[in-house]
Image (cartoon, coloured by chain):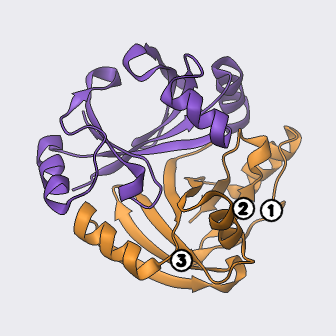
Chain colours: A orange, B purple
Amino acid sequence: MFDRVDHVGIAVRNLDAAIGFYEKTFGVSLAHRERVDEQGVEEAMFRVGESWIQLLQPLGPDTPVGKFIDKRGEGVHHVGYGVPDLRKVLDHLKEEGVPLIDAEPRRGSRGSQVAFVHPKGVGGVLVELVQE
Amino acid sequence: MFDRVDHVGIAVRNLDAAIGFYEKTFGVSLAHRERVDEQGVEEAMFRVGESWIQLLQPLGPDTPVGKFIDKRGEGVHHVGYGVPDLRKVLDHLKEEGVPLIDAEPRRGSRGSQVAFVHPKGVGGVLVELVQE
């Protein structure tokens, strides 16, 4: 059902500073930067093997990532798993009674289709399903 | 410096229940299960592409993962990045002044060499470096 860890989404306060840290300290190269108003973030993506490190700076304190940082501080915000057929996975999760944030696929960054699964159904892990 | 997301380490209260959930709901197959006394956990590994999902049940409340769950609840505990040369990466991080939990490589699960980087140096993310 999952074919890869698509990305690890990490909440940061200052995207420019975090990009500089990841480049200098971890030697990864910025591949993509995008403001995603629907999700209230500016994001930066670094390629690592078949996955991405995704840094997320909230566009304001009342956004989901802004509230996350206010409550828990910076850190891992969610895990994205790549799936070949997002609708099929969502149908399966509905049958299993797993609580979904997105019952239907919606547009993600880089032209992908995405849906979030509620962390209360996944042992505290906010899961994003990503179909390229 | 990083060649893959080696694993996402997830703290769970009940390993058997969590394994059942991941198998039934996410359709991933258990590949490996091991008690790692040095780290105070019993762990279960599921292959996803070139990465692993690693579920971690603490062996007691005074272990690092036990304290994590007590403080923050279940959820993502750390991110493991695969590196080709762990000593070289540790030397670079020391030069950069990044605080390390493990200044030298130590034995991880599956015969790997690992070292943890302190989350206060990585924007709240506990990072494990893994050399197979």
* Mark-to-mark CA distance, 3 and 2: 14 Å
Q: Residue at x 81, y 64 (%)?
A: A104
Q: Badge 2, how many Cα within 10 Å: few under 14, some, many 20+?
A: many
Does residue A107 appear in the picture of this structure?
yes
Q: Earlier in the sequence, mark 1 or mark 3?
A: 1
**Label number found at residue A115:** 2
Which residue does the numbered mark 1 point to in the structure image? Answer: A102
Q: Chain letter of disc 3?
A: A
The answer to whether marks 1 and 3 mark residues whose Cβ atoms lie closer than 8 Å is: no
Q: Residue at x 13, y 42 (%)?
A: B87
The image quarter containing residue A60 is bottom right
Does residue A27 appear in the picture of this structure?
no
As helix, strand or loop, the secondary structure at mark 3 comes to helix
As helix, strand or loop, the secondary structure at mark 1 comes to loop
Residue A30 at x, y percent in the picture: 34, 75
Q: Earlier in the sequence, mark 3 or mark 2?
A: 3
Q: Amino acid at mark 2?
A: Ala
In the figure, is residue A98 to the left or right of A55? right
The image quarter containing residue B38 is top left
Q: Residue at x 26, y 37 (%)?
A: B102
In the figure, is residue A83 to the left or right of A96? left
**Label number found at residue A110:** 3
Q: Amino acid at mark 1?
A: Asp
The image quarter containing residue A111 is bottom right
Residue A38 at x, y percent in the picture: 71, 81
Q: Badge 1, how many Cα within 10 Å: few under 14, some, many 20+?
A: some
Q: Chain letter of disc 2?
A: A
Q: Residue at x 14, y 44 (%)?
A: B85
The answer to whether marks 3 and 2 mark residues whose Cβ atoms lie closer than 8 Å is: no
Which quarter of the rendered picture does the N terminus of chain A lie within?
top right
Which quarter of the rendered picture does the C terminus of chain A lie within?
bottom right
Q: Earlier in the sequence, mark 1 or mark 2?
A: 1
